[in-house]
Structure formats: C-alpha cells, structure tokens
Amino acid sequence: MNDDSNPDSSGTARTIEPISNAAGREVSDATHRARLEIQECLVALASGLKPTLEIKPLTDVGAGVFEMKTRGRPSFRCVFHMKEPGKIVVVAGREKAKNGPLRPLLEVVKKRMKKG
C-alpha cells in the first residue's frame, strides 16, 4: 500500500457511498462511537490523508478491497473498495465477534461485489 497504509495517496478527493442500502444500514446500525470513527477514517481517505484507523487489504476478496476495525468494545469492521476512480464504496459493516471468523463477512462482501 502507499504512504504508510494509505490505500490512496494520490491527493485526489473521492466521494464516499455505500454499495447498497443494506451496506449503508449496517454502518448506520453501528454504535455512535464506531460510526464516528468509520466516518472520520473514510473522510481522511477520501481527502488523500493518512487514515485514522488501521486499514488492511482483503486479498481473499480481490485487489482494491480493504477492511478497517474500530477501537474499543464493541469493535466494528467496515469493508470498502477503491476500485472506481473518484469513489470509496462501503461494501459491508459488522460488529466484530470476539474471536469469530471473518468468513461470514467475506461471503457477504463477495456477493455484494458481484452484484455491485
């Protein structure tokens, strides 16, 4: 990744949008604190700044797909992609299980990316 975990350091502003109504609802259903952390991180990325949360690529899903996790309890996962020029697309959001597998979330992400 570019610039110390910034998936896009091109300096070009991007728009942020959900891939579907369901993805938008999932993020909206997060705790207030988690929503603020996710929003702050996405806005930083959209502005070409260093993300405020740790971002990891989800290579199992494909190139350009990333996951961020909020801090604290409950923790929340947000998956997004940056495959379309000028856009950050939120694909899914879920409360993170304590030691639960990522597999169910990955299945949802793969399904939505196919529809996308």
Image: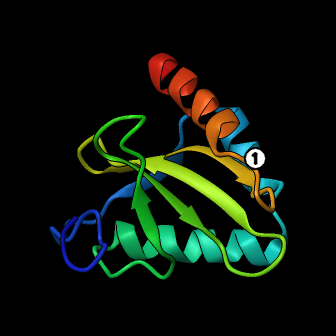
Would you say 40 lies left or right of 16 here?
A: right
Q: Residue furthest left?
A: 10
Which residue is painted at 72% across and 34% down in the image?
22
Q: Residue furthest top?
A: 115
Which residue is painted at 78% across and 78% down in the image?
33
User: Residue 49 sits in which quadrant?
Assistant: bottom left
Q: How many marks?
A: 1
Sort mark 1 into few (<14), some (14-19) or many (20+) by Cα contacts within 10 Å: some
Image x and y of residue 3, in percent: 20, 78
Would you say 95 lies left or right of 81 here?
A: right
In the image, residue 62 sits, relative to residue 40, either above or below, namely above
Image x and y of residue 51, in percent: 41, 77
Image x and y of residue 23, in percent: 66, 40
Looking at the rendered structure, the kind of residue marked 1 is: Glu
In the image, residue 104 sits, relative to residue 12, either above or below, namely above
Rendered-image quadrant of the N terminus: bottom left
Which residue is painted at 60% across and 55% down in the image?
78
Which residue is painted at 76% across and 81% down in the image?
72
User: Residue 35 sits in which quadrant?
Assistant: bottom right
In the image, 64 versus 116, the foreground residue is: 64
In the image, 57 versus 101, the foreground residue is: 101
Q: Residue furthest front?
A: 99
The residue carrying mark 1 is 26
Q: Mark 1 falls on what kind of element?
A: helix
In the image, residue 6 sits, relative to residue 56, either above or below, namely below
Colouring scheme, one of rainbow, by chain, secondary structure, one colour: rainbow
